[in-house]
Amino acid sequence: LMDFRYLSQATVIDEVHCQKILNALQEFYDHKQDIIACGAHLGTKRKNVLNNWHIPKLELTQSVIPSI
């Protein structure tokens, strides 16, 4: 997600840049189950392992490229 965040803050975004943003986001989605499986996705308050990605800001990442 850091690559996604970095790439999406560019001052100029062309088709090649859009594809890089999509690839960075896809890489996260390809590996998010692995992150959960190894226990690396923790809650902020109780530090317990979360088994989902119900994060509203994460859902907004899907609208970045269509809005450009």
Image (cartoon, rainbow, N blue to C red):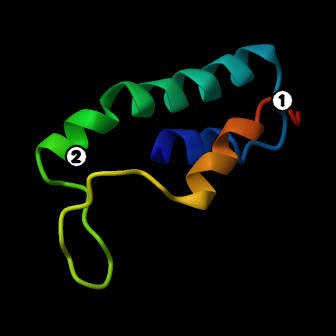
Q: Residue 54 in the image: x percent, y percent?
A: 48, 55
Residue nearest the observer in this picture, 60 or 17: 60
Q: Which residue is mark 2?
A: 36
Vertical order, 54 against 22 (above or below): below
Q: Residue at x 54, y 21 (%)?
A: 23
Decide: few, some or many residues near mark 2? Use Cα within 10 Å; few <14, some 14-19, many ≥20. Answer: some
Horizontal relation, residue 39 to residue 45: left or right: left
Q: Which residue is mark 1?
A: 66
Residue nearest the observer in this picture, 55 or 28: 55
Q: Amino acid at mark 2?
A: Ile
Which is nearer the N-term, disc 1 or disc 2? 2
Circle 2 SS class = helix
Nearer the observer, disc 1 or disc 2? 2
Horizontal relation, residue 11 to residue 23: left or right: right
Q: Amino acid at mark 1?
A: Pro
Q: Residue at x 21, y 35 (%)?
A: 34
Name the residue furthest left: 38
Residue 22's image quarter? top right
Distance Cα–Cα, label 1 vs label 2 = 28 Å
Vertical order, 40 against 49 (above or below): above
